[in-house]
Image: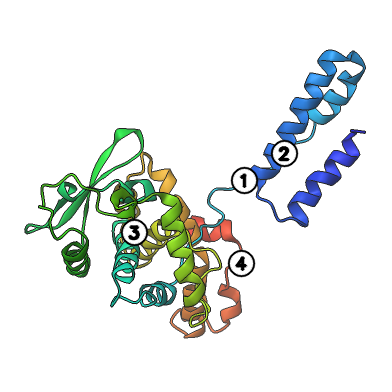
Amino acid sequence: MFNRKNVDAYLDYLTVEKNFSPATRNNRLAAIRAFVSYASACYPEYMALESELSAIKVQKDDPFSKVEYMTENAVSALLNEPDIKTRTGLRDRFLMIFLYDSGARISEALGVRLCDIKLDNSPQVLLFGKGSKVRTVPLMEKTVEHLKQYVSVYHKEESSASTATLFYVMHKGKKEPMNDETARVILQKHAASAREKCSEVPEKVHPHLWRHTRAMHLYQHGMDLSLVSQWLGHANLSTSLIYAYADTEHKRNAIEKAMRGGHSGITDATLCIVDDDSLLKKLYGM
């Protein structure tokens, strides 16, 4: 039943109708090729088909084409959603605040212990990331205020030297570290209700979205990309380039606004509109 034509049609269906990512499309193609390769090893007459399918090119996925992040209005709507008069509401809000302020991966955030937090003259938290790498991230003054409020309720009997995890749940009367699935449920629950009040809240609010959001906001507010990279714990600066590329639309709007305002000395603003993303990235030295 396999042939080049219907495999091509299937891949187009995944891309156009199902709106699957290039990575998913390429994985499906790899699975088909693996099966046909096995079949041709058993039955040589399928070798021609294997050759045909090997000619299908994988779809390139531009990692810099887009990055998901929330607007500042969406962040505010989400942080205002939990009822902080309740114990769980206080926890839920601080979880979101901590994810946003620290830019931590969810595994890093849920792995934080009380002893990893220092609240002296320069409040900071130790994050244990990929490959056993450790980095120190500063905590903002407002975050420290929320942290103290959270600890007074959830860790009132613990000392600052305790190895107890910062975020936990109660299971059969015992404290257990919160897992990432619980965190996802918490975020999605508040996202659903916040979206009714703010249309800018995305359909899916997952833990990593807070990391992207914080990095994007820092970049948009003027933080150097190399500092953003260090703050996120990226091994290579190139990994952080997604934020620069994702901001091209923001830059284009700024350029067009400036041109329309007559600050350039050019009377015909339409001559200065930049439609080419590649050109715009070059102009900004990306």
Q: Nearer the viewer, mark 1 or mark 2?
A: 2
Report, in whole angstroms, how far the alpha carbon at label 4 lies from the one at label 1.
Answer: 21 Å
Location of residue 5 in the rendering, given as x and y in whole percent from the top left corner: 90, 39
Quadrant placement of the N terminus: top right
Q: Nearer the viewer, mark 4 or mark 2?
A: 2
Location of residue 186 in the rendering, given as x and y in whole percent from the top left corner: 43, 63
Report, in whole angstroms, how far the alpha carbon at label 1 lies from the one at label 2.
Answer: 15 Å
Label 4–label 2 contact, CB within 8 A: no
Residue type pointed to by label 2:
Arg
Q: Secondary structure at mark 2?
A: helix
Q: Please give the residue where the numbered disc 1 appears in the rendered image.
A: 61
In the rendered view, tell whether residue 193 sits above or below residue 203: below
Q: Tell which of 246 and 234 is nearer to you.
A: 234
Q: Please give the residue where the numbered disc 2 appears in the rendered image.
A: 28
Q: Please give the residue where the numbered disc 4 appears in the rendered image.
A: 275
N-terminal of the pair, mark 4 or mark 1, is 1
In the rendered view, tell whether residue 58 sits above or below residue 270: above
Q: Please give the residue where the numbered disc 3 appears in the rendered image.
A: 99
Q: Nearer the viewer, mark 4 or mark 3?
A: 3
Report, in whole angstroms, how far the alpha carbon at label 2 lies from the one at label 3.
Answer: 34 Å
In the displayed structure image, the side of residue 284 where residue 87 appears, left or right: left
N-terminal of the pair, mark 1 or mark 2, is 2
